[in-house]
Image: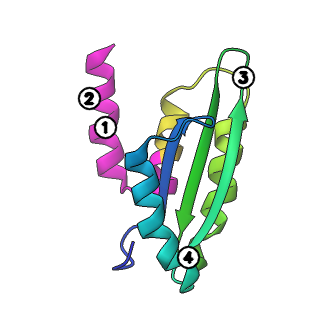
């Protein structure tokens, strides 16, 4: 992100149970939020059986990706390859990278 190559970073943890390793990353990223190089948003997603906390960082010109990612995570229904591909797109992966990831995921199922 500092080189402007990656538009969005997303960290996920169990709600209100953030591991120390993520807290260290947050401190590093938050320095760049304070300087205006990144924007940050925290969001919780709850379902019947789980609750996750998302911390998203984006380049200022790419902040729209945060809202789209949150909407994607809150869509009802089952997570599938179309959502997986959209997530990859929002994170800044190229189509060929998403193709490789989709192929690897299909092999695991």
Q: Residues within 10 Å of mark 1 (few under 14, many from 20)?
A: some
Which residue is farthest front? Answer: 20
Q: How far across and down, in percent of the image, does residue 66 sit?
A: 63, 59
Q: Residue 47 carries which label?
A: 3
Which residue appears at 53% of the width and 86% of the height?
35
Residue at image mark 4:
33
Quarter in which the C terminus is drawn: top left
At x 54%, y 64%, the residue is: 57
Classify residue 60 by image quadrant.
bottom right
Q: What residue is drawn where x is 30% and y is 50%?
A: 96
Residue at 26% from the left image edge and 40% from the top image edge: 100
Q: Do the residues labelled 2 and 1 touch (CB within 8 Å)?
A: yes
Looking at the image, residue 59 sits to the left or right of residue 6; the answer is right
Q: Is residue 104 magenta?
A: yes
Badge 2 vs badge 4, beta-carbon distance below 8 Å: no
Task: Label 2: state its secondary structure.
Answer: helix
Question: In front of the other: label 2 or label 4?
Answer: 4
Decide whether the magenta segment is chiefly helix, strand or loop: helix
Identify the residue at the far bottom of this view: 35
Q: Position of residue 84 (x, y in %)?
A: 48, 36
Report the front residue among 40 and 97: 40
CA distance for labels 2 and 3: 27 Å
Does dot 1 land on a helix, a strand or a loop? helix
Q: Is residue 37 above or below residue 74?
A: below
**Any mark on residue 101, and which?**
1
User: Which segment did they paint magenta?
Assistant: 88-109
Which element carries disc 4, helix, strand or loop?
helix
Q: Which mark is residue 104?
A: 2
Judge the density around disc 4: few (<14), some (14-19), many (≥20) Cα neighbours within 10 Å: some
């Amino acid at each position: 992100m500092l080189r402007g190559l990656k538009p969005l970073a997303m960290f996920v943890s169990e709600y209100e149970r953030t591991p120390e390793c993520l807290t260290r990353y947050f401190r590093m990223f938050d320095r760049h939020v304070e300087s205006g190089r990144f924007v940050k948003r925290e969001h919780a997603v709850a379902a019947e059986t789980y609750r996750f906390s998302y911390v998203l960082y984006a380049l200022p010109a790419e902040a729209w990706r945060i809202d789209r990612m949150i909407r994607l995570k809150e869509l009802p229904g089952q997570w599938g390859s179309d959502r997986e591909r959209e997530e990859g797109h929002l994170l800044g992966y190229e189509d060929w990278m998403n193709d490789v990831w989709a192929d690897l995921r299909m092999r695991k199922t």
